[in-house]
Image (cartoon, rainbow, N blue to C red):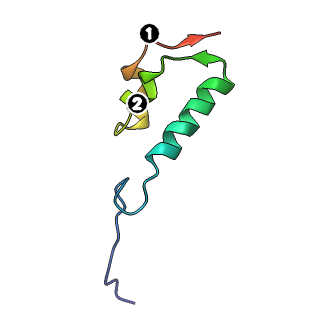
Amino acid sequence: MQIKTILFDFDGVVVDSESLHLRALGEVLDNHGIKYPDDLLENFVGRSDSSFPDLSPLKLVRS
């Protein structure tokens, strides 16, 4: 079988999953009792998960 087409879905091109990803991240933080500023998730748009600790190492507070 010869492959004729390969489809890459960069987030937002075919399926916009960014809002779902941010909501899930917020729920994980909430479920672990971690408080964060309102703009934290907005500033995370377009970044990889591995960059999250670098984005806000001092802004996260466990309640």
Please state the total of marks drawn on the protein image. 2
Residue sitting at the far front: 38
User: Is 42 displayed left or right of 28 in the figure?
Assistant: left
Crowd rating for badge 2 (residues with CA inside 10 Å; few <14, some 14–19, many 20+): few
Q: Residue at x 54, y 34 (%)?
A: 25
Asked which secondary structure carries label 2, the reply is: helix
Estimate the x, y position of residue 13 in percent, counting from the top left. Answer: 34, 59
Of the residues under marks 1 and 2, which one precedes in the sequence?
A: 2
Q: Are marks 1 and 2 in contact (CB under 8 Å)?
A: no
Crowd rating for badge 1 (residues with CA inside 10 Å; few <14, some 14–19, many 20+): few
The mark closer to the camera, 1 or 2, is: 2
Q: Is residue 9 above or below residue 27?
A: below
Identify the residue under disc 2.
42
Q: Quadrant of the C terminus?
A: top right
Q: Nearer the viewer, residue 38 or 30?
A: 38
Q: Is residue 19 above or below residue 4?
A: above
Residue sitting at the far bottom: 1
Q: Residue at x 36, y 28 (%)?
A: 43
Estimate the x, y position of residue 1 in percent, counting from the top left. Answer: 40, 90
For badge 2, the amino acid type reads Glu
Estimate the x, y position of residue 50 in percent, counting from the top left. Answer: 41, 33
Which quarter of the figure has residue 12?
bottom left
Identify the residue under disc 1.
58
Asked which secondary structure carries label 1, the reply is: loop
